Every structure is written in C-alpha cells, then in structure tokens.
Image (spheres, rainbow, N blue to C red):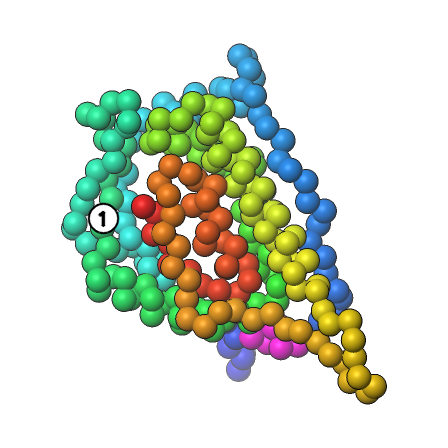
Amino acid sequence: ARAAKPTRPAMLRLYATSAGTGIFKVPEVHNEPFLHYPPGSPERKALREAIHRLKGECPDIPCIVGGKEIRTGIVEAQTMPTDHQHKLCTYHNATPEVIQEAIENALEAKRDWERWPFEERATVYLKAADLLSTKYRAELCAAVMLGQGKNVWQAEIDASVETIDFWRFSAKFAQDLMAQQPTENAFGVWNRQEYRALEGFVAAITPFNFIAIASNLHSSPSIMGNTCLWKPS
C-alpha cells in the first residue's frame, strides 16, 4: 500500500519545526524604476490595451473569505469619476455573518501561516512584487486610471512603483528587525529574542484612492506572521 501524501499544512508544520539548512537572507533590494510611457513604447501599448479591455468589462466582485467567493446580494456599483454613467464593476457588501466567517477563517489560517519560516513568507511578497513589476503592471495602472481618475504618471507612482517597493522593502525591513538581538549574555546562557505574530487578527481598512497603502497595510503585518482582514474602503 502507498502512504498518503502529506497535506500542505502538515508539510509546512514539518518544515517549520525541522532544522534549517542555512541562514537565508532576502535578496538585495532596490527601488523599482519608473516607466515613462513614451509614444511607441511597449509599456504605452500595453497600457492602452489594458484600459480598452477594462473599460469594456463590468465584473461582479464578491467578498473573498478563505479563498471562497461569497455574493451577498447587497450590490453596489463603482462608476468612473470622469463618467458617472459608466459602470466599471459591481461589488457585494459584506454582512455581519460574512465578517464573522472571515474572522474565524483568519484565526484558523494563522495557526499554519505564523509557523512558516520567515523566508517562505517573504518569498510570497517578493514574488508578488516581481509579478506586479511585469505581468500585471499595465492592468493595475489601467484600473487605477479608470477607477480613481488618476493620470498615467500618478498611477505609475502609486499603483505600481510604490506598491512594488512596499512589498520588497517590507521583506527586507522585517529581516532587519528580526536580526536585532541582545548583545549581552550571562556565562553559559544564549540570550535570544523571538519575534512572533500578534494575538488575534489584524483588520486593515484602507483608503480607496491610494493603492500603495491599500497594498501595504495588510501585507506588512502578514510578512511578520499575522493574518489580516482586508476591507478596501
């Protein structure tokens, strides 16, 4: 008979409690370069295509709880600031029951997430920053331009560059924080300081017009092992 394959949480618990094979460091971090979108450039073409595509769509946005889509039926629409008759999307407002379910899911997920080795948690956001720097940059900038009325330069600064920097530097600064250790030790004693997640969960209610802050207020606590409820305002 073949033994059952360990589940992801079980594998994570095993990894988190086993001896490490090295002392890992976050790769060297630099500020994300700005794109300037000159005529004829690939980034300008990609942005125009993304704007055209998103403007022609009207997705229905559910609440996301534990990876599950929940549609409450309490629906409102987001319109373009420059054209109030044009709907960009509809979205479902959360109910008290949905919020309670989200809290319970966050607390359950925290049991495994806080046990992940720091370098594994940091990797999640370093990879997200790389994807935003490339694959999803035009789409996010287009969404901000349409949904918040920002021009291309404002969207580039806020939605892409600053968000990418937050994710990369948060990983670096978390590493720097945990590297701060006591310098004095009694004979025969190794005086160490451990950094653990907060009790409970973190609630992040973020501004509607500042994507970088919306991305940072929940991701920074998450890198440190916390789980968050994110409610964009």
Image quadrant in which you'd find residue 78: top left
Q: Which class describes the residues within 10 Å of circle 1: few (<14), some (14-19), or many (20+)?
A: some
**What is the residue that sits farthest to the left in this orientation?**
73
Q: Tell me where the magenta segment starts and ends, as one range.
A: 13-19
Classify residue 22 as left or right of residue 44: right
Position of residue 86 measured from the top left corner of the image (x, y, whole percent)? 23, 26
Q: Position of 181 compared to 211: left or right? A: right
Q: Main secondary structure of the magenta part?
A: helix
Q: Is residue 105 magenta?
A: no
Please give the residue where the numbered disc 1 appears in the rendered image.
92
Q: Is residue 195 visible?
A: yes
Q: Is residue 7 visible?
A: no
Residue 76 is situated, as x and y percent measured from the top left of the image, at: 19, 42
Q: Is residue 208 above or below residue 173?
A: above
Kind of residue at badge 1: His
- Furthest toward the right, the residue is 187
